Amino acid sequence: METLSAKPDTRNVSVTPRPPKKRKQGLWQSIVRQKYLYLMSLPFVIWLFVFNYLPVWGWTMAFQNYKPSKSFSEQKWVGMKNFVDLFHDERFYLVLRNTLAMSILGIIFGFIVPIFFAVFLNELKGTAFKRSVQTVSYLPHFVSWVVVAGIITKLLSIDGGIVNDILMSLHIIKEPIQFMAQGKWFWGIVTASDVWKETGWNAIIYLAAITGIDKELYEAARVDGAGRFKQMWNITLPGIRTTISVLLIMSIGHLIGIGFEKQFQLQNALVTDYSEVLDLYALKYGINISRFSYGTAISMFTSVVSIILLFTANGIMKKTTKESIM
Amino acid sequence: MAAKAFNATRSEKIFDICNIILMAIILIITLYPFLNVLAISFNDSKDTVRGGIYIWPREFTWENYKTIFGYTGLLQGFKITMFRTIAGTILGLISSSMLAYTLSRPDFRSRKFVSTFLALTMYFSGGLVPTYMLMRHLDLIGTFWIYILPGAVSAFNVFIIRSFIDGLPYALQESGKLDGANDFMIYYKIILPLCKPVLATIALFLAVGQWNSWFDTYLYNGNKPHLTTLQYELMKVLASTNQGSAMANANDLANQMAQVSPESIKMAITIVVTVPILVVYPFLQRYFVSGMTLGAVKA
């Protein structure tokens, strides 16, 4: 029966005989038998290979002095030169600082605000009001960063932007502030925009997790005289702890690869010292001025650090809370 | 005892009122920017310069909308965006549902391999430059295909659909097999119709992603006026007074038009670009809420 198989599975033969329904067929036989399953998955596996795995092969460019006109065998290998250049570039450290600053701010606020929003929203009694708050809170998620950047710029403008108008009328400031033109405001603006855009959306998962908490726990707490804050702190938050830690690990994994859409759309020439992040840096060097190998080295640095962070976060979480994503 | 109960309800009441106020503030912060954009888009563009438009236009006019609908770049962008949204959504639905079905079959021999192969793509990517070079080698730059091919298979979407299929009774598939249906027929005739709710969620994710994307246009097709998308056109218009914002190609017609666009015109374009996607999401809300939850559990 195994004769037809390309790779006979003999590993288990001498060990305890397996129950017949678990008996493995030859690979070729099972391919023939499950040909439709292979036809339905194989094209997409090839697809993934081309669009997701082949670019990783492109990392070799980081060790070359890559010239697009030459074939792979004709490229000149330069070892770690591009990385040495990268680590000697002062700009790189500025960009790394910006990336870390904005991603850490993003994790702190983008992570905590949705949890609190979900917890407080859950305490709302009127269901119609609750539902409308929730529906409206998703709204910004469906809008592109192009639109959000336009809106934020409008809100913060010195002529007729509501933020300056409110601050002026409350006499907190005497002159309108040019928020978008000063680097020191940029990190805060990016973080606040992100919180505005994604809080409602990110709260979905927590709200769902809260729904799964046993209602009797609240009853019992109320009998014991626990107030609403106590209930939130002692029942709701521990009740969604698993969800919180899984999402925290995932966001730490993305710490350094925070993307660049918001920075790209919100930046302008006056604030580049604060707005440029690793991906924008890679875009500028790698594509706009065609230093492909250098740009690849930047991308590769980003990916490797992300993976290290992901595994570290996962490891720490596994030890401390027994939760993990892998 | 009675006094204690009274106290408890009074503090509960205070809490409820504070909470309602808090939520109302969040509601206003979320909605105000949209209402502001809407009001400015309906205000006379010369009057807008004076400032002070909040949620109601001072000098109501349809002029801004009439102006932008005469702008060819926008109509062209609308067409391309529509095409990519429809094509990208359909392709994404087919790929993720087919893959999800094969991964949900416990007896599929290569299930583990495909599943790992797919999951790994969630944790790393080649990065900007290698991806760009790949597109160059594949001759996709400057074509419509670049909008829909690279992102057609998404691990996240596949895993959401798979968890949904896992929740369906397996007996349905076995009865299909007894009736002599092959695996593809089971997928097409039995699984797909049952997956409508989760497919609606994924369709929304895919459509929003396609509708809102601008970076692929910027990176690959920025100098191809017949292939630029709505978001990219909006970006050009919005960037027109942001001094120093680095627009790569500043001498095409759209940009000349953008250079002189008053605030009200910009806001009218923003509304036109935004409204189509905002119209659909409330109808799909109950689906994507459960979809997100499924995704979080598995992914």
Image (cartoon, rainbow, N blue to C red):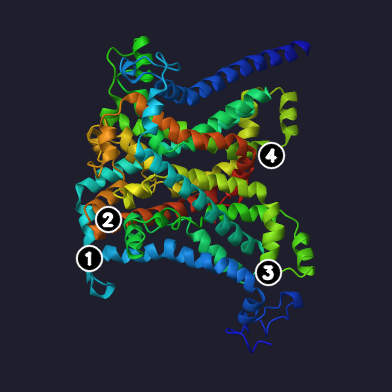
Taking the spot 31% from the left edge, 57% from the top edge, the residue there is B129
Disc 1, SS: loop
Q: Chain of mark 1?
A: A
Q: Chain of mark 3?
A: B
Foreground tag (4 vs 1): 1
Q: Residue B1: image x %, image y %? A: 78, 14
Q: Is residue B275 left or right of residue B128?
A: right
As shown in the figure, which amino acid type bears the numbered disc 2?
Gly
User: Where is mark 2, residue-wise?
Assistant: A295
Relative to B162, residue A196 above or below: above
User: Where is mark 1, residue-wise?
Assistant: A67
Query: How many C-alpha atoms fall within 10 Å of the one at disc 3: few (<14), some, or many (≥20)?
Result: few
Q: Residue B209: image x %, image y %? A: 48, 45
As drawn, the label of residue A95 is none
Taking the spot 72% from the left edge, 54% from the top edge, the residue there is B168
As shown in the figure, which amino acid type bears the numbered disc 3?
Asp
Q: Chain of mark 2?
A: A
Q: Earlier in the sequence, mark 2 or mark 1?
A: 1
Foreground tag (2 vs 1): 1
Asked if the residues shown at circle 3 and circle 1 are in contact, with their CB atoms under 8 angstroms apart, the answer is no
User: Where is mark 4, residue-wise?
Assistant: A212
Q: Nearer the viewer, residue A234 or B14?
A: B14
Q: Earlier in the sequence, mark 4 or mark 1?
A: 1
Relative to B13, residue A85 above or below: below
Asked if the residues shown at circle 4 and circle 1 are in contact, with their CB atoms under 8 angstroms apart, the answer is no
Cα–Cα gap, marks 3 and 1? 47 Å
Taking the spot 56% from the left edge, 37% from the top edge, the residue there is B280
User: Where is mark 3, residue-wise?
Assistant: B107
Taking the spot 58% from the left edge, 83% from the top edge, the residue there is A7
